[in-house]
Amino acid sequence: MKMNILVRQAISETMGVMLFVTSIVAYNTTGFHNLVLATTLGLMILITATVSGGHLNPAVSLFMFARKAIDLTTLLAYWIAQLVGATLGLYLGYSLSGQAVIAQSTPQISQSGAFIGEVLGTTVLIMLIVRLAATKREALIPFAVGLWVFAVSTFTLTGGQANPAVTFALMLRDGFDQNHLMLVLAEFVGALVALLYVILLDTPAKAKKKAAKKM
């Protein structure tokens, strides 16, 4: 059955995000929640990488658009797919756990600490992808991203969401309050910081290597 390439990519992004969000909300009390969600994300990237590039994250897609790796139409299609996947994952996760989707109160945490944590989490996540792709080690991306998500989920106040789609799912559950909107802003700021890293630091290094080869 022939299918439009962009449709296939969008379905891939939807399914990947859906299962990732499902693993976040459908957890039990065994104490392995962070490991489960990190493993799920790594596996979803592994599955979707050859179809859609395995973005599974609106901030990653925005970065790729800024780097002209995807066009505007693809960016918008990915964003819609990722948000749809997040919505489906929220309800699927709660269905699996046998619980109703009920808003949870936001714990009192440092807003500046939460903001910085999301910027850091998103920035490093994207930088990992960029460096591994630039050094032709794309096969390691699913494992590296999974490890980073596991790590950042243990030392940030927000559990290292680093993904506007994940935050969107939590907003659907808890309400579109200022705290969640701040985290979305932080995640996109993280994408911008990663872009500045590539432009200011990574690109000159590549230019020097090319010049050295020509000599």
Image (cartoon, rainbow, N blue to C red):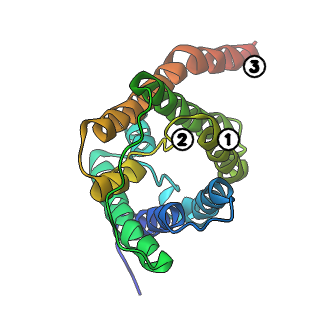
Q: Is disc 2 in contact with disc 3, using a CB cutoff of under 8 Å? A: no
The residue tagged 1 is 151
Mark 2 nearby-residue class (10 Å; few <14, some 14–19, many ≥20) = many
Q: Nearer the viewer, residue 19 or 202?
A: 19
Residue 65 falls in image quadrant: top left
Mark 1 nearby-residue class (10 Å; few <14, some 14–19, many ≥20) = some
The x, y position of residue 113, in whole percent, is 48, 25
The residue tagged 3 is 213
Regarding residue 120, the answer to whether it shows in the image is: yes
Q: Nearer the viewer, residue 153 or 200?
A: 153
The x, y position of residue 29, in whole percent, is 63, 65
- Residue plotted at (58% across, 32% down): 124
Mark 3 nearby-residue class (10 Å; few <14, some 14–19, many ≥20) = few
Q: Nearer the viewer, residue 32 or 134?
A: 32
* Mark 3: amino acid: Lys
Q: Residue 189's mark?
A: none
* Mark 2: amino acid: Gly
The residue tagged 2 is 160
Q: Secondary structure at mark 2?
A: loop
